[in-house]
Image (tube, rainbow, N blue to C red):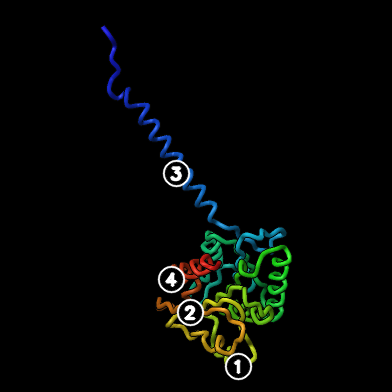
Amino acid sequence: MFFQKPESSRLLPALQYRISALAVGLFGILLSTAALAGELFTQLPEQAQADEKYVFYSHGFIVEGDNETPKHPHFGVYDFPAIKQALAASDFNLIAYHRKAGTVPSEFAQKLANDVKELTAQGVPLRNISLMGFSRGGMITILVSDLLAAPDINVVLLASCSNWVSSQPKLELAGNVLSVYETSDRFGSCRELVNQSDNVSSFTEIAISTGKEHGAFFKPLDEWVVPVVNWINSRP
C-alpha cells in the first residue's frame, strides 16, 4: 500500500513558486518607482549629478517668513510642504528655498542665477535645469531668466504675469517656457512677455479653470501639477 499525498500538498510547490514570482515582480515595481523619485533639497546640493534634472521652485509672497503654511483670508492655506512633496515625487531633483521675510526679488534672483551657474560648473547642462515660480516666485523666476539669457534653460511660470510685466518693457524671458494660469485669476497669459523676448526657444501656455482664483496654486492640485511635471520630464 502506497501513501498518496493529498492534492493540496502536490500543489504547494507550484503555489509557492507563484507567490515568490509575484513577490519578485512587486519588488521590481517598487524599485523602479523609487528610481523615478528625485530628491528634495532646501539648499543647493554640494555635488550635482550631470545626468539628472534639477528644478528650482520659488513660492509665493505669502510664504516669506517663518511659516511654511500661512493662511490667506480669501485663498486659504498655502501648503508649501505639500507642494514640495508632490513635486519631489517626480523624476527630477527639487530645490525649494524658504525665503526670509522682506526678501528683495532682484537680490534673490541674483542668488538663483548664481546657483544655476554653480550647477553648470559641476557639469549639469542647462537643458537639465528648470526654473519654476508662482506669483512673487514667478516674478523672481522671470528676473533670473532675464539675468541668465540662456536659450537652453527651462522656465515654468505659475500665475506670474500681471500688470507688473507691462511696466517692464525691457524685461525678457529666455529658454523653453511653460506658462500656467487660472482663468478666474487676475494673473493671466504671459504671451505679452514672450512677445517682447528674443531668446525664447519654445513657448507653451495652459489655462486651467478650477474657480479657485490665485488659490489654485496654494496646494498641489492635479490640474497644474500633472501638466507641469509632464512638461519638465518631457524636456530632452
Q: In which quarter of the image is residue 4?
A: top left
Check whether the beta carbons of the residues at disc 3 and disc 1 lie within 8 A of each other.
no
Residue at the top extreme, as displayed: 1
Earlier in the chain: of badge 2 and badge 4, it is 2
Camera-near label (2 vs 1) is 2
Give amino acid for label 3: Leu
The correct choice, above or below, for 30 with respect to 139 in the image is above
Label 3 – label 1 distance at C-alpha: 55 Å
Identified at 32% across, 23% down, the residue is 10
Instruction: Tell which circle, 2 or 1, labels the residue nearer the N-terminal end.
Output: 1
Crowd around label 4: few <14 · some 14–19 · many ≥20 (10 Å): some
Residue 113 seen in the current view: yes
Q: What element carries label 2?
A: strand
Mark 2 → mark 1, Cα distance in angstroms: 21 Å
Which residue carries the number 2 mark?
A: 205
Tell me whether circle 1 and circle 4 mark residues in contact (CB < 8 Å). Answer: no
Mark nearest the camera among 2 and 4 is: 2
SS for callout 3: helix
The residue that mark 3 highlights is 26
Note whether 187 is above or below 156 in the view shown: below
Crowd band around label 2 with a 10 angstrom C-alpha radius: few (<14), some (14–19), many (20+): some
